Amino acid sequence: MSSLLPADGARLLIDGKLRQGGDGVFETANPATEEVVGLAANADAADMDAAITAARTAFDDTEWSRDHAFRARCLEQLRVALQGEVEALREITVTEAGAPVMLTKGPQLEGPIADLAFAAGLAENYEWETDLGVAEPMGIKTRRTLRREPVGVVGAIIPWNFPHQIGFAKLGPALAAGNTVVLKPAPDTPWCAAAVGAIIAEQTDIPPGVVNIVTSSDHALGARLSVDPRVDLISFTGSTQTGRLVMAAAAPTLKKTFLELGGKSAFIVLDDADIAGAVGVAAFSVCVHAGQGCALTTRLLVPRASYDEAVQVAAATMGRMKPGDPTDPGTVCGPLISRRQRDRVLGYLDTARAEGGRIVVGGGRPEGRERGWFVEPTLIADLPNTATVAREEIFGPVLVIIPHDGDEDAIRIANDSPYGLSGSVWGVDPERIRRVTEGVRTGTLSVNGGIWYSADAPFGGYKQSGIGREMGVAGFEEYLETKLIATAG
Ligand code: NAD
């Protein structure tokens, strides 16, 4: 048990107080060992109700939404406090999320903590008010002032794969904009959230009710946020399937829904690229965090003439990527989050076989790892883009390799997907690369290994990968309303 959390179980954060859950406790496990590592507070409906009430009151009855400088200071204070506890947070993240410790130096922990500085900067420096000047609509001389204001109470619902990255990418801008938040973490990673709750309560001046963290083993508690009329905006990250439920549940109260959903992104290798180099990168990247990344490129599209070579290179790379202990600094591919998720991935491998796919490497649980929810990095060849494993998000270390017949065909295949989250293009000719990046309909694209992830860069999906953008100024503005004041004279 971490020093941040009490020995008898982690706590909820409601109205500034760390408290036990109305439904007792539930267990949290280490995906690498399958061992229960401790207990988390199990909230009930009354706890969720109290959290929403607290957030509503903090928004309606305090100066939080108006005091930009105070918010900037609180966010900076939170960033420094989190940084001060980074080793305890790292231990929790590796233990509970099965995150390779290597990744906690970047997007699993330290990156998102540092990114809170961007949110704090926006609270301080954003142009909250714009003078649109004087006009005379309908003959009445009028000065128009555009004001940007927080939306209100934000219900933030997050998954388990990058709990801090996704958590802070919502908390940072939502708070910077002046909203109050009820955060509902995934049942698989309650400690990651509870530890942040303890830091907020004990080490920052963030006022009671501004951030509430409600852990629960029950997904239905998240659904309460979507339906409650006191919640003004739902910021959801998770599967497309759940995203649809959230949107439908939010419809009767017409609350704004901001959705970051699944993906089935394509890695396009053009025929003027260094084929082996590009394919090696594609094969490596799909193994990172055991493939549990929404934006990972899980379809590899290679020139038909180079298909056999590409299959060989990808297989050799993935064969070397042995799933390992996430506490080992050399591990890139750790365990999957849960037995359920592991079995789901193995089920997809059976489907690939049943549909005539060739498992070139991997295909099951790694030998010698009887404990832990590990799956071998797996390359699937000889299936068309219409196959189930090429269409559905697997969320495991699984790559499907598909031949293309030139740039236009590669664009067509990349876009032949219900998703549109991310992608990658490798080639030499700038004109061809430009044409491909214009043709592929996704929210982010990497060219020749460029990194799109950073605090000031908006991220999100086209099509069924989501609605809205997270991070960057665009991500911050998702949490704002626009008000126009028209003053005569
Ligand atoms: P999930 O959709 O099962 O759950 C996500 C969250 O929603 C959890 O907190 C869960 O408890 C909650 N939830 C479940 N049912 C709900 C309901 N009816 N109403 C409200 N909340 C509900 O997703 P997961 O399995 O935890 O995470 C993996 C998924 O997340 C993948 O599809 C992945 O692509 C996606 N993801 C997307 C992004 C992105 O930014 N686009 C980032 C990371 C993960």
Image: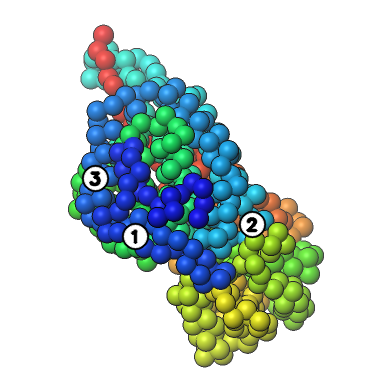
Q: Amino acid at mark 3?
A: Ala
Classify 489 as above or below 126. above
Q: Amino acid at mark 1?
A: Val
Q: Nearer the viewer, residue 135 or 382?
A: 382
Q: Position of residue 181 (x, y in %)?
A: 35, 41
Extreme front residue here?
A: 7
Name the residue tied to disc 3: 50
The quadrant of the rendering that contains the C terminus is top left
Q: Residue at x 26, y 39 (%)?
A: 54
Q: Position of residue 48 (x, y in %)?
A: 26, 50
Q: Determine the CA span between mark 2 and mark 1.
A: 27 Å
Q: Determine the CA span between mark 3 and mark 1.
A: 18 Å
Q: Residue at x 35, y 43 (%)?
A: 18
Q: Position of residue 63 (x, y in %)?
A: 32, 24
Callout 3 secondary element: helix
Q: Give the image's coloring scheme.
A: rainbow
Q: Position of residue 226 (x, y in %)?
A: 27, 53
Mark 2 vs mark 1, foreground winner is 1
Q: Residue at x 69, y 51 (%)?
A: 450
* Sequence-first disc among 3 and 1: 1
Name the residue tied to disc 1: 25
Circle 3 packing at 10 Å, graded few (<14), some (14-19), many (20+), is some
Residue 484 in sight: no
* Sequence-first disc among 2 and 1: 1
Name the residue tied to disc 2: 101
Callout 1 secondary element: strand
